[in-house]
């Protein structure tokens, strides 16, 4: 199993996703600042993985804080949370994870400092285990939605590398394959960071699931040729009305799927659902460095001084989304209702 | 003015489009085989430029052929034509240009060998001049279709670098700007060969036309944000029913434009219109080397052994095309009728 991230005594250990697929290198972040840097520089990425990485970063920072009392610990804890929260704005799992660590802190604030530290470390490790369990549940819930054969398109990487293991969209794919589906995967390469060609292709290749890498601009042609029977992607934040923020280009894929009559599925853990955000217009979209667009592996690919855009995410309006697969169940339109039902742990009508 | 290609006594001189935008390097092909290689390796690319390059390649090969009679020259001429025709399958301008050189050959076949050689050189140079004139006429015919301000999206490079000068889609943009339109251009980077980020951005930057490079997967997000008021692209072959083969990804852009209610224009010289091909299903689509997808500037970006697809073109069905801008006039639906009218040089009703 791919160890995307891991709590160790020496710090938080990550597979370095900037080095894949040609180098499998692991880095250990010995301080919470190093964890924050790893999130910002995308050594670790993917909304669920970012959430747990941040929780582990908080636990690491608190563990190493010098404090004899909760009064001394609290301002350090708050600063640690603040720095980790400032790494990336779109994936709501980051804020969800930090909020959960804050709640845990308050719930044990009356205990000795060492107990608080142990409780936070345990909470982060618990979130790690819950993330894997959620991915496996998504897999079970979503597997039967995919076609039993033919091509399935995915965009970016919503796999083991985007989570603590198994994956969201790729978890559903893994589960479908495990249950006997003879599907083959088309992976959009996903410019500019190439999560598809570098990461999705790498991890599906490791599992022996047949995978074809295509440029983002080839997906519509593949659909027209009948090569794609379903689309499944992950999410960085899902608003209360079902609008989905995910990797830039997801919206394009959703439009193409609609145009070709192909179902478009989103798989995400409940921590990605943000019922406090009414719709996609209220989701902050991260703008990343121009260098990701102007250079490739150190080589300049645009004329000097040219303007570029580099939004890391886009919003797919809920009308394009066939279903949202979570560990709690599968939400279908109207999402304003079905997501509320899942939030109350009520069954959603099929 | 950018000298994309040029007849010189030493051979056919090209700006090396594989080196742009960081190096402005010119190469002179001293033999017709070198011209064929330049087309195949995309030192020169773009349907109209490929056509004229092939004509100049034919002229060069014939000029240097050792022949004392037309009987000795003809088999050499046919072999030259065959080798140049085998370079790339989709752009119909290649075959159009070679056919025109064959017609010229037959029309002067009764003359002395030296006269035949001179006539073919002159014909290729004439095609060069006609190509520039056609681009300028497309510019005049199409400029008023573009919005007077705001953003215009283009895909791939249909500019001076894709023609003998001025450009097709970018010629229309240049003409609009020259007539006072305050438009800014969004250039899809156009994976995998990056004609947009490397070539379109470079030539528009040289002209001082404000240009923003985006990844192919960002176009829909820009449209939703209201940043794009029109799309204009070139073409490699247009079938009798108006279906348009153009750089891979064009079909995606057309779907996105339709979904956002944005007009989608195609600009192409008459030599790109292939009335002998009934529809897009009959257009051969070139598949290029996997290496273009698996490596970038020598760096491996996919896991070893992964499958990739690399179709160089796709077909946009005519129902997505708002108008086809040619030097003969602007065709609108139904294209089966309007293209026939233009072929007879009849005016097309506005």
Image: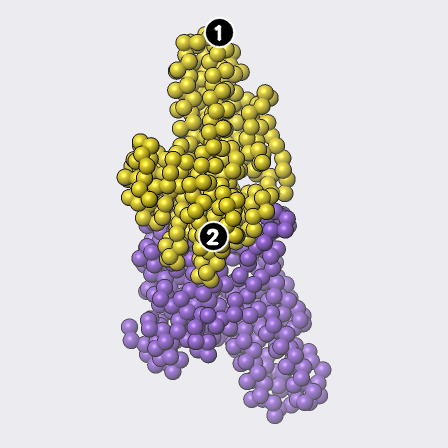
Chain colours: A yellow, B purple
- Which residue is found at the position 61% from the left and 72% from the top? B86
Please determine if labels 1 and 2 lie on a single subunit: yes
Where residue B18 sits, quadrant-wise, is bottom right
Pinpoint the chain carrying mark 2: A
Where residue B278 sits, quadrant-wise, is bottom left
Q: Secondary structure at mark 1?
A: loop
Mark 2 packing: few (<14 Cα in 10 Å), some, or many (20+)? some
Q: List the residue tagged with mark 1.
A: A68
- Which residue is found at the position 52% from the left and 44% from the top? A178
Disc 1 vs disc 2: which is toward the camera? 2
Mark 1 packing: few (<14 Cα in 10 Å), some, or many (20+)? few
Q: Is residue A341 left or right of residue B51?
A: left
Q: Earlier in the sequence, mark 1 or mark 2?
A: 1
Quick one: A238 or B152, which is closer to the camera? A238
Q: Is residue A345 above or below residue A267?
A: above
Q: Which mark is residue A148?
A: 2
- Which residue is found at the position 48% from the left and 72% from the top? B282
Locate the N terminus of chain A and report the quarter of the image it occupies: top right
């Amino acid at each position: 199993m791919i160890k995307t991230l891991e709590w160790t005594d020496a710090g938080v250990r990550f597979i370095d996703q900037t080095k894949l697929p040609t180098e499998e290198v692991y880095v250990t972040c010995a301080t919470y600042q190093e964890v924050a840097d790893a999130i910002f520089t995308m050594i670790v990425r993917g909304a669920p993985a970012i959430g747990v990485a941040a929780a582990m970063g908080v636990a690491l920072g608190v563990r190493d804080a010098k404090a004899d009392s909760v009064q001394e610990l609290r301002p350090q804890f708050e600063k640690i949370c603040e720095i980790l929260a400032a790494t990336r704005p779109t994936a709501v799992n980051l804020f969800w994870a930090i909020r959960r660590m804050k709640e845990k802190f308050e719930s044990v604030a009356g205990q000795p400092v060492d107990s608080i530290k142990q409780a936070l470390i345990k909470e982060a490790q618990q979130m790690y285990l819950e993330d894997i369990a959620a991915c496996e549940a998504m897999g079970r819930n979503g597997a039967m939605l995919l076609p039993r054969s033919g091509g399935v398109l995915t965009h970016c990487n919503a796999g083991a590398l985007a989570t603590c293991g198994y994956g969201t969209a790729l978890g559903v794919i893994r589960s479908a394959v495990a249950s006997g589906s003879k599907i083959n995967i088309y992976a959009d390469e996903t410019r500019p960071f190439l999560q598809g060609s570098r990461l999705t292709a790498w991890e599906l290749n490791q599992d022996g699931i047949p995978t074809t890498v295509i440029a983002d601009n080839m997906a519509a042609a593949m659909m027209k040729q009948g090569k794609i029977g379903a689309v499944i992607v992950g999410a960085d934040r899902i608003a209360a009305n079902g609008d989905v923020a995910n990797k830039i280009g997801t919206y394009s894929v959703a439009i193409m799927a609609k145009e070709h009559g192909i179902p478009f599925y989103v798989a995400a853990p409940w921590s990605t659902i943000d019922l406090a955000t009414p719709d996609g217009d209220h989701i902050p979209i991260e703008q990343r460095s121009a260098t990701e667009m102007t250079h490739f592996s150190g080589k300049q690919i645009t004329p000097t001084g040219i303007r570029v855009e580099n939004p890391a995410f886009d919003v797919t309006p809920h009308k394009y989304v066939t279903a949202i697969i979570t560990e709690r169940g599968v939400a279908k339109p109207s999402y304003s209702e079905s997501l509320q039902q899942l939030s109350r742990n009520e069954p959603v009508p099929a």
